[in-house]
Amino acid sequence: ADTVHRYGAKASIELAGFAMGHEMPEEGKSPIDMMSQEEIKNWITLFANAAERAMKAGMDMVLIHGGHGILVSNFFSPLFNHRTDQYGGSIENRARFACELFDAIRSKVGHKLAIEFRLSAAELVPGGVELDETIEFIKIIQNKIDLVHVSAGMLLDDEMVPITTQPSYLKRGYNAHYAASIKKAPGIHVPVTTVGSIDLDLAAEIIENNEADMCAMIRTVIADPDSVNKARTGHEAEIRPCIRCVLCLNRTHGMEPLRVACAVNPQAGRECELKDINKLADHKKKVVIIGGGPAGMEAARTAGDRGHEVVLFEKNDCLGGTLRLAVAPDFKADLKSYLAWAIRMTSRHSNVSLRLSTTATPENILAESPDALIIAVGAETNIPAIPGLDGSDVVWVGDVESEAVSVGENVVIAGGGLTGCETALDLARKGKHVTIVEMVSEKKMLEPSPIPMTALLQLLKKENVTILADHQLIKAIDHAVLIEGRSGQQEVPFDTLILSLGVKPNLSEVSKFANLVDTVFCIGDCTTNQGTLYTATTAGYNAGLDL
């Protein structure tokens, strides 16, 4: 709290009770006991004591999470609350737990600590809370709190997760219309904040339209912790945008939680580790970078920030690498904004010289007399040794993304990873009939990026995309693929077969430069087959830092 105050900000902490998340018995069906009066009092005491500790620690506010199907919302939700005592039935009774909770907190902290209450304006499940009930609920509790924080949805199952997190396939500011309805409802006077993948421009629009009094943002400031100060001082073009890939949530909310991390901000979650590193390097070096994709650009900016002289070779006439292929669909607007930012900040950097439309060779690298070389030459397309993949009706997914090739009406995509599924969604929305063939199960398809992939699969099914999970591609024949699943083999016809089977490190290109100078870093896709923006920017940042 002292550190937060030192920078002129207010400190708040979230308190939540995840009673619904308790482990279930392994014996099979078991009765669910109603929470006893004693247990209710105990939970209320736990919240009140936690708020008191927060006050003593110097916090200015506590946020009581009462949305998304966790404890406080369980009492108000008719879906969960089937009680027949004073805590169930009418709206007043279902609001009783929250009222007693806020009263208990006030008895401990008085008005030295503000109370913010987060709720789901609508739970968006059959039998759940609707907006009109929420408005009545707020009227009952508003004199006991200082701020109502409006979200929506419920974490009843994985299918609901995208609603509460809004990855890039969903619109920004999903909850703003709920906040506006609450704020404008007769009898509501408590200040209203809203949340839901909001950036600074959208926040300004929401406030200007009187849809809310405040906007809550976290991913925006994970991507760029200095975003508000940059906006205040007229440096909006320098704000590094969040791409809503939800890596931060996937890491912190997984089965084995990891530290927070960000695909576009390689410093996120590493602040303590990095705080003692000098901003400027002890010795200025001449650094040559081969490749202007996300890894190369991150390395160039980081090395330049540390005072090194950087020369970046890029064979194409523009920066961006394969990231340029991924930004064409409308639902990739967030990634497109990041790409524009990365190109802008790299091109403008005073310590970075660009050699565009220039193929790197050992000769022109050595002509720069570099002290260090960073190789970021990207990856090669992975085409497995499967018969028939050399046909004229077989194309690479990158050429489809860049619109270098056209596709027929009936499309089969081999590979159901993020790239394949995004391409399928884009083509389906353009009227194509799309089938995805993926060797792993649909459940396994979620594992690398559970939240965005859950949203993506929902959208694919809405667009009537056929997903043939657990199927192996055997061969391509005349306008059809032969695939094999648990029920045997079948042929799936196509006009165009799109290969989205990942990439492999471009080791032959790396070998041309690996021994040119004593200090060499290989970063990005040329060293890993993961091919994620996170691995690219992290490797680029680390290389720039380690010079």
Image (cartoon, rainbow, N blue to C red):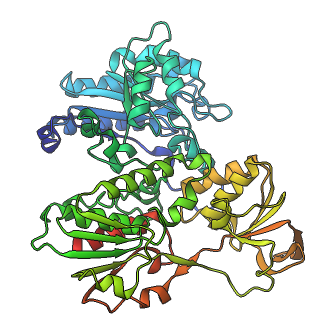
Please indicate, yes or no, whether residue 547 appears anywhere in the rendered image. Answer: no
Q: Position of residue 311 (x, y in %)?
A: 29, 71
* Residue closer to the observer: 116 or 181: 181
Residue 329 vs 477, above or below: the answer is: above
* Residue closer to the observer: 457 or 75: 457
Q: Is residue 76 left or right of residue 445?
A: left
Quarter of the rendering containing residue 513: bottom left
Q: Residue at x 24, y 90 (%)?
A: 518
Q: Is residue 170 left or right of residue 66?
A: right
Please indicate, yes or no, whether residue 52 appears anywhere in the rendered image. Answer: yes
| In the image, farthest residue toward the top | 186
Q: Position of residue 481 (x, y in %)?
A: 84, 75
| In the image, farthest residue toward the left | 282
Quarter of the rendering occupied by the C terminus: bottom left
Quarter of the rendering occupied by the N terminus: top left
Q: Position of residue 377 (x, y in %)?
A: 45, 77
Q: Residue at x 75, y 46 (%)?
A: 462
* Residue closer to the observer: 41 or 414: 414
Number of numbered discs visible in the structure rendering: 0
Q: Position of residue 219 (x, y in %)?
A: 39, 46
Quarter of the rendering containing residue 132: top right
Q: Residue at x 46, y 20 (%)?
A: 211
Q: Residue at x 32, y 36 (%)?
A: 47
Quarter of the rendering containing residue 126: top right
Residue 94 vs 25, above or below: the answer is: above
* Residue closer to the observer: 174 or 402: 402
